[in-house]
Image (spheres, coloured by chain):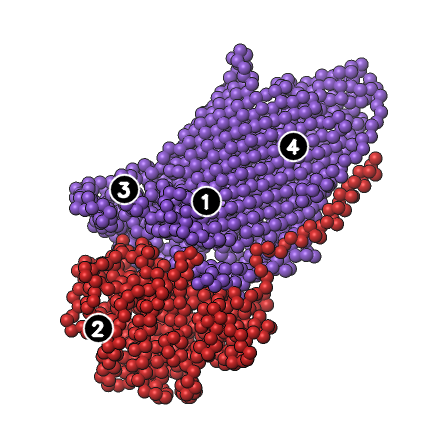
Chain colours: A purple, B red
Amino acid sequence: MIKKLLLSGLLCLCTVVAWAQQKTVSGKVTSSEDKAGLPGVSVVVKGTSAGTVTDVEGNFKISVPSNDAALVFSYVGFKPQEVVVGSQSSIKVEMEADTRELTEVVVTAAGIARDKKALGYSVATVNSDRLAQLSEPDPIRAMTGKIAGVNIQGSGGAAGGATNITIRGNSSLSNNNQPLFIVDGVPFDNSTFQTDGGFAGGSTFTNRAFDLDPNNIESMTVLKGAAAAALYGSRAANGAIIINTKMGKKKSRKGLEISYSTSYSTEQLAKAPEYQTTYGQGTEFDTRLGVFGSWGRAYSAIDSIPHPLSNRFGAVFPELVGKRVKYAPFGQGNYENFYERGYVYENAVNVSGGTEKANLTVGISRTDNKGIVPFNSISRTGVNIGGNAQLDNGFYVNGSFNYVNTIQKSPQLASSIGAGPSAIEIMPWTPVSYDLTNYPFANPITGGSIYDRFGVDNPYWSVNYSGLLSKVDRYYGKFTLGYDPLSWLNIQYTGGFNAYTDRRTNYNGRGGEVFPNGNITDDNIYRQELDGTLLITANRDFGPNWNVRAIVGNNVNQRRTERQAVFGDGIIVPGINDLDNTRVQLAIGPNLGNIKQRFFAVFADVQLSYKDYAFLNLVARNDWSSTLPPGARSYFYPGVNGSLVFTEAFGIKSDLLSFGKIRAGYTVVGNEAGAYQTQTVFNINPNFSTPAPVDMQSPFSGINTLTYSNRLGSTVLKPEFIREFETGLDLKLFKGKLGIDFAYYHKISTSQIFTVDVAPSTGFLSRVTNIGKVKNEGIELGVDFTPVTLKNGFSWNINSAFTLNRNLVLDLGGATELQYGATGNASVTSIHVVGQPYGQIRGQVYERDPEGRVLIDAVSRVGKAILAERERAIGNPNPNFIWGITNSFSYKGLSLSVLFDWRDGGDMLSISVAEMLARGVTRDTEDREQVFVYPGVLADPVTRRVLTDAQGQPRPNNIPISVNEYYFGTGAFSGSQGTADEFRVFTATTYRLREVSLGYSLPAKFLKKTPFGSATLSVSGRNLWYFAPGFPKYMNFDPEVSSLGVGNSQGFDLVSVPTTRRFGVNLRVSF
Amino acid sequence: MRKIYKYLTALSLVWAMSGCGKFLDVNVDPNSPTEPVLDLLLPSTQVSMVVNLGTNNPNIVATCIVQHATQGGFSRFELLGTTFQTAWNNIYSVTLADLDIMISTAAARNNTAYLGMGKLLKAYTYSNLVDIWGDVPYTEAGLGEANLAPKFDNGADIYRDLFRLIDEGIADLQRNPYVSPGNVDLFYRGDRALWIRMANSLKLKMLLQMRLIPTERDRVTREINLLIAGGQLIGTNAQDFTFRFGTTETPMNRHPTYLTEYRAAKSFYMDQGFMDRLQAADDPRLRYYIYRQRPDTGVSFTLTSNGYGGRATGDPTGIPADNAARATFGLYPYGGLYDNNPIRNLPATNRFLTNTGANNPAAHRVVTTADGSGAGWHPMITYAMMQFMLAEAALTLGTTGNPRTYLRNAITTNLQSINTFTASPGNSGLQMSPDLITAFVDNRLAQYDAATDPRGRLNVIMSEKYIALYGNGIESYNDYRRTGLPVLMTPIAPLNPFPVRFTVALRELTTNPNAPQINDLTKKVFWDID
């Protein structure tokens, strides 16, 4: 494969043809701002197509026909300049930044920098200063609230927790909806692998974009729509995030620059629930040990109770038998003491140096993040080297190599509804009179778990004896070889590789309640991606007004996964978490351990510009994918977009409107299938599902088995398509003080490759097919406003990113609903429903009358509502809108930046909140000496008909229930596991002060006598305040959690690690 | 110059295109075979059939409905669309799908052993589906893409066709040469004579099930007599159509019900009515069926009783932390512990359930995964069941034989079978002596003799069968719907009327346009006639 990729690059090698010129002029272009050389400035002999670009130092050399010739210097973001050559043989040009225009240089396909105004689609860039040194080690989370159209959902406060990101909504019903990551021009795998093959209750696994160090990112460009993504192919159908690392940096300030940055942040629980302090363990004002409810007697009623451990563990702790302990509230302490203080410690050194011809950058960085849960940490060590060189024979090369080692340690933090071990599974509702902090958690004789509750491990025992270790070694990089045979023609080949191994060990200690024998699962994952891209770019002026820039290219790609997991049951010697230390081992797959897929593509991108204000862009691509059936592998997708800078076209020059651009585009993107979806296979030694904690396994009594797959492959699979229309407006108003970037899009995805449920009676549970239609429609509004700029250097800037997306499932190929995703609880899943937004939360509901009133069982008179036979959609996890506002103030070297965001709407099924209500632990349920009558109507539980009075009117519910029953008992209307799931859904609207950073750059005069070229000191804080009004007040719940992590099932909190707050100090110096 | 570039561009494209075909031919799953293997499919279908019918919700819910044991929701008849989802889905997409492939492959390869066994397993599975769900997809089921909306066939029509299928299966097995599958046949180790006995016994079971249909009564009577005359029914305990679970934890081969109970958190309560019935009836099987974790719990876990602490059926109250206090499943048939601890307050008149030979001192324990072996049975058609069925047939239809003799055989062989189970690998407990068995059976026959009318006699037969069927709730559920016997307790707080059929999986309802619109729990299956 590598050979083939190389070969097509090497084919570009060719002879060099020299040509004669009359006079040679050399010179240097610098920036007026910092006097540094500007690389990549276009230098053109006026009136001709002859020209060159400056090198990395800003130097250029050009031949001109005569002394009368004029040179035009142009560079994105700077005011163009024209210089008459005259008799000079050396020309120095200082270019001034053009504040009037959008200064963003946008990196599009294969690293080509383009002026944003030429783009007919929406892009957004976040520069390093808005990503690094903000006490956030996750590069995706660092983007939150900064880009319109992007929806980022963290999975909670675990160190290295997964982060879900979608751009412009979910298009695909079942396939990947995450954007494609491109790092230095090469795809960067962002998979999340779950280790759950049977026994591991699951843990918090990071997604692999975490392997990128925010400190090493130069810029992040988000290509939001299908239009922007056409050249990256199918995988960018959900948008693309183009990351340029500092390794790819072309500009070097001095001969040698060394920069060092360091930051230290402390991390703590953002907010704890507020626990009630009036009542202890029990039910209905009665003390009952072992009950996980805090509805017992008031503390004022009695002084002491028998030691809770004497009840179940009298034999283990004979000294506690007969002992009494103070009957007092420990709830707050139980919760707060469990979570520790964590930290993030980052160090990065970057060295870059170079000459006119060559440039090299080397970096090394280390990030340590210790989470708030004991034994939870993630560390990332990266070594990067990158460089570029201009060879004498006209070729240029550049390349980079990165090695990252990421080690994640985590206790069992699986979100769970009792389906597996999780350290925090029921910790939040530990009975409030049980002193979790101080009572023993391990059996002194056997080392097993000691807890008040059966079937669940003590959280302290769990974090000490069970956990997950993931060791990732990742290698990625690229090389580019290019040549400019003509001033307007460039040929280059980029080969990229990206591979990692993830060696995981998941262990459940011996003596736990769920896995008494203890077990260890080793899961080895290898993933590799190879990518090669040939680009031939022609860029020519035709006359003074017209320019054509055409790219043709090809792209070859291969992805491979190899995986093997082995389960070892029965830990022999506790504490040694090695497979060799288990009694019996069993290879457990997974079923698709080896996967390989490839594609090949050719593409073209042609841009016509007229007078630098009208642009038309045509793109087309044809892919051949290995995952589609032979004969149907080829698919073609075109696009067109254009933009018009109407202020220039119509000569509008005013302070009110200094710049205006309108753009529109229509793009089709095809998408391939996953590997091996075209056939139906047999599975060797399957598991057979049972209600037991462990399924029936093969071999059975030594006999091997085989079963036909439940998934019917499709031999007639076609590619799926997304069609997107987008239009937008860029405006600069009030002398450029107010910038507005507005976009509207309408995206329809059709004939999706979906593994749909089929009637089990067909012999299959699902089949692969082309089905369905999803619409996403939305607006994005980016506003950049500088209301105040004072002469003394003070300025105030407001940057706002507003995202509104509406999605709708239009068709599911005949079915009205399709269920997907699994939460560990049969009734709670994700579901697509025709005519409703994407990915609803499904769960149990109570029967209702036509007016929507809940039917209350009139016969048993316990006040319980009647459960409906069928589960329904009970919540929509999609937010109404997301709005991030950054206020930045700067004065001389001082800068202050404050990011506030508002996520409106979106439902969340929260097991933790529901259970805490049910168990009566927080102040929300403290006022309990009363009765409730739920506002419903009485009905017959058998016929499910509403009972009517003499007048034929429904009889309102008149059965009073205690507060305990309302939340916890059989009458439950909130929380408890007997409750219909609809009462566990809350609106996740959140207002948040996400990020505050105060920085100070030391003035150059202070640094004169030091070895430092510059020094910046900053302090930052994250998640300093939030308010989620949809949740019960004293829960202090932060909905920025997602128990199912990355994927299409969102809106579930099945007891997640709560979010954290960080305070950090950051220092960056350069020599 | 330009030509060179054009040429180069063209060349690189040509390279890519020419290599394209082979380069992209990588979409064959390297992890999984695409061809069936008969001797791997047969054991797979057997395990999945037993797991889905016998250890998943069909049997669990039936067990709760007939009050062999209890769980909050099921004993209150809370049957939802998701209740039988796993079982329904897997019976059709795993068990029956694999059986169909096995049958077609065996037919193509002319392998009569797999062909015959496949048909019999399919007939047994479908007869169960009709019994618990009534109308189910049959003629159009399992066709994959060819029919994505299989119609629901009438249960009576399916039953009719199953008799044909069973006869075909017998004929296939009788063909020579016969190549035995040997040990991969987990039921009968490839012994076709036993399979033929199972086939005839299945027919008898299905015929008896239909006895209330007026138009079928004569045929049922005639054919049962023919089966009796043929002498090819299951005729000893060793010929039982019973599935034996293994003892290994990795790979997990233990009985799933044992797994859910022999751990700290439990899914079941023992049914108070059932335990009381056995205690009151001086039944020695109580020590095999129920294990007491404490000597002193009773209903609602007051510590004033003798350890048989369970719940009455349909108890709506929440679940306290009583996992270590409640009684749990014993040795038979799930592979747990034999309860040899003394029982308080046993009447002095007891002759069979006594404290003779009981542990001294008592050694109750809170059960864990280390207790018992999980080497349980799932009894599907046993010799004892056959004898009970013949007793019912003789009594109600006048078929060949004396109901009293059949009843004697039935109870005797059931107790002997429990003895055999107790002595089987992985299990341990005391044996019931032959004298005790004889005396106990005589005692029950006295009750039979004391009954004055056919209904009373049938009640003795069905009550004894009900106790013997412990572990197979589905058969008891069938019997109860057919005969209304034994008389069960009324659930404390039912949420629905007594279900006369189970709910079809929600997935089937939402994906198959030919499925019924709603689950009607009050619509009787075809043989359920009052």
Q: Which residue is mark 4?
A: A399
Q: Amino acid at mark 3?
A: Pro
How far apart in space, not on screen, are marks 3 and 4 (Cα)?
Answer: 57 Å
Q: Residue at x 38, y 48 (%)?
A: A572
Q: Would residue B325 be visible to someone looking at this image?
A: yes
Task: Respond whether the residues carrying marks 4 and 1 are from the same subunit.
Answer: yes
Q: Earlier in the sequence, mark 4 or mark 1?
A: 4
- The quadrant of the rendering that contains the C terminus of chain A is top right
Of marks 3 and 1, the one in the foreground: 1
Choose top left, top right, bottom left or bottom right for residue A50: top right
Q: Position of residue A571 (x, y in %)?
A: 38, 48
Secondary structure at numbered mark 2: loop
Q: Position of residue B307 (x, y in %)?
A: 22, 61
Picture layout, residue A523 above or below residue B292: above
Q: Chain of mark 2?
A: B
Q: Amino acid at mark 1?
A: Thr
Q: Position of residue A373 (x, y in %)?
A: 38, 38
Q: Which residue is mark 1?
A: A505
Residue A440 circle label: 3
Choose top left, top right, bottom left or bottom right for residue B256: bottom left
